[in-house]
Image (cartoon, grey):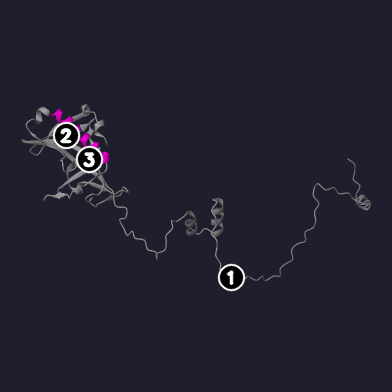
């Protein structure tokens, strides 16, 4: 698929003769494949025209930053016409790109909406037809060159269309009385999953997230009920001083004598 047709080598274009009804046609292939062209963002300047068969005639105008697209596309048309010059002589050329002094250049396409895949700006398929002045871009299939007794032209098929939907497609007004909705965090999901508050607070500490402060009023403190113990509270154990390893211990003579008398004789080895 090409976004710039000026990069296409015309020598790689193959024109296959065929017939479509009463018209003589030449299928257009590039390297034995169909030629798809992606347009830049364009817009519909006027209302679309429908006929009794359900076909639609749609014009697409280019934005000024991409004006070279239509110019390169028309130059590519002329290169194909040159290859068929001997067969197209004495016939009028129906240009797919219309231009006038008082109107912007525009690409005219004929299509049936049921044959087109329409997508919105989120890449979701939709059935809503684009409106006037709505930005859109297309993937076009340059199908064939057609010719009858008095004129010839190019047949394009709109394969896909993507339109830019408005930013506010639903109710967009802000209501001061409505509560503000905050995005759901991973801690909210943990709380919904039934994980304990202690585990969530530990996770917040690991992530360096400050814990939410709890605002208590005097009424909340008055409603607090303390739990009573069935058994009496035992006094805390006395803290006996302990000697550090660096301190030395010197026993008395009485301690040494009592330790000597407590020794028992053992059989020599």
Identify the element where label 3 is drawn: strand
At x 10% / y 31%, what residue is drawn? 88
Residue ID at (47%, 55%):
185
Front residue of 222/11: it is 222
Q: Give percent across and percent down for residue 156.
A: 18, 40
**In this rendering, the label closer to the viewer, 2 or 1:** 1
- The residue that disc 1 covers is 221
Quarter location, residue 100: top left
Place of residue 234 in the rendered image (x, y in percent of width and height, measured from the top left)? 73, 66
Callout 2: 10 Å neighbours few (<14), some, many (20+)? some
| C-beta proximity under 8 Å, tags 3 and 1 | no
- C-alpha span from label 3 to label 1: 72 Å
Indicate the secondary structure of the residue bearing disc 1: helix
Residue situated in front as seen by the camera: 30 or 168:
168
* Of pointers 3 and 1, the one earlier in the residue sequence: 3
Magenta: main secondary structure equals helix
Magenta stretch: give its range.
63-84
Sequence-first tag of 2 and 3: 2
Judged left or right of residue 180, residue 77 is: left
Report x, y in % for residue 189: 47, 56
Looking at marks 2 and 1 on the same chain, the residue that comes earlier in the sequence is marked by 2
Q: Of circles 3 and 1, which is in front?
A: 1
> Which residue position is annotated with label 3?
140
Distance from label 2 to label 3 (Cα)?
Answer: 15 Å
Residue 93, disc: none
Above or below, 158 relative to 165: above
Residue under label 2, please give it.
27
Residue 122 in the image: above or below residue 147: below
Give me the C-alpha separation between circle 2 and circle 1: 86 Å
Q: Secondary structure at mark 2?
A: strand
């Amino acid at each position: 698929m090409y976004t710039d047709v000026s990069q296409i080598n015309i020598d790689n274009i193959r024109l296959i003769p065929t017939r479509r009804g009463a018209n003589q046609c030449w299928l257009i292939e590039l390297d034995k494949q169909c030629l798809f062209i992606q347009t830049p963002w364009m817009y519909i300047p006027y209302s679309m025209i429908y006929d009794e068969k359900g076909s639609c005639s749609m014009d697409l105008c280019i934005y000024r930053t991409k004006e070279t697209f239509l110019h390169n596309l028309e130059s590519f048309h002329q290169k194909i016409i040159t290859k068929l010059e001997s067969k197209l002589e004495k016939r009028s050329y129906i240009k797919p790109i219309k231009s006038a002094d008082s109107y912007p250049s525009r690409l005219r396409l004929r299509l049936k909406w049921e044959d087109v895949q329409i997508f919105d700006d989120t890449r979701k398929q939709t059935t809503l037809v684009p409106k006037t002045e709505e930005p859109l871009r297309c993937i076009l299939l340059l199908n064939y060159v057609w010719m009858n007794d008095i004129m010839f032209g190019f047949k394009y098929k709109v394969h896909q269309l993507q339109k830019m939907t408005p930013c506010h497609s639903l109710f967009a007004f802000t209501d001061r009385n409505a509560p503000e909705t905050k995005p759901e965090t991973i801690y909210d999901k943990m709380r919904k999953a039934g994980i304990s508050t202690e585990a969530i607070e530990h996770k917040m500490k690991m992530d360096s997230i400050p814990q939410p402060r709890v605002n208590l009023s005097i009424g909340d403190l008055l409603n607090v009920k303390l739990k009573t113990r069935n058994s009496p509270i035992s006094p805390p154990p006395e803290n006996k001083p302990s000697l550090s390893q660096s301190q030395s211990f010197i026993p008395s003579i009485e301690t040494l004598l009592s330790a000597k008398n407590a020794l028992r004789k053992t059989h020599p080895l």
